[in-house]
Amino acid sequence: MKKEIFQGKIFWLTLFGVTIILFILYLVFFSDNNLRKRRELDKKIENLEKSITDTKNKIENNYSYDQLKKDSSKLEQYGRENLNMQKNDEDVFIVVYE
């Protein structure tokens, strides 16, 4: 009698362990948030954060970030000079020297 109970526990523990292992494998390799996609997204986030800091550094070379945030005329001037932005009703010509 004791042997049958012990074998039943082993069966359920083995079944539980196999289920957990299959669930972990599903999460790691087959789900929508698998490791490969997570690594790709982390790289994209890292590149975007680097781009943000580079852009802020460029802005601070000409104007302080707070100046642009507070004064809309300086923001417009910065956009026109450095980002080649324009109003809807005007044309902008960029002269490139070779």
Image: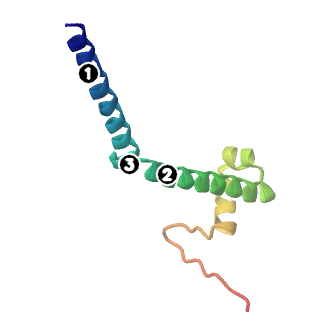
In the picture of the structure, the residue carrying the numbered disc 1 is 12
Q: Is residue 76 left or right of residue 98?
A: left
Q: Which of marks 2 and 3 is in front?
A: 3
Q: What element carries label 1?
A: helix
Report how far apart the C-alphas of labels 2 and 3 lie in the structure.
Answer: 16 Å
Q: What element carries label 2?
A: helix
Q: Position of residue 76 (x, y in %)?
A: 64, 59
In the picture of the structure, the residue carrying the numbered disc 2 is 41
- Of marks 2 and 3, which one's residue comes earlier in the chain? 3
Q: Which of marks 1 and 2 is in front?
A: 1
In the picture of the structure, the residue carrying the numbered disc 3 is 29
Farthest-out residue, top: 1
Farthest-out residue, bottom: 98
Q: Give the amino acid at mark 1.
A: Trp
Residue in view at x 69 percent, y 61 percent: 78
Check whether the beta carbons of the residues at disc 1 and disc 2 lie within 8 A of each other: no
Q: What element carries label 3?
A: helix
Q: Where is residue 44 in the image (x, y as percent from the top left)?
A: 54, 55
Tell me the quadrant of the picture where the C terminus can be found.
Answer: bottom right
Rendering quarter of residue 8: top left
Residue in view at x 32 percent, y 38 percent: 22
Q: Is residue 10 left or right of residue 46?
A: left
Check whether the beta carbons of the residues at disc 2 and disc 3 lie within 8 A of each other: no
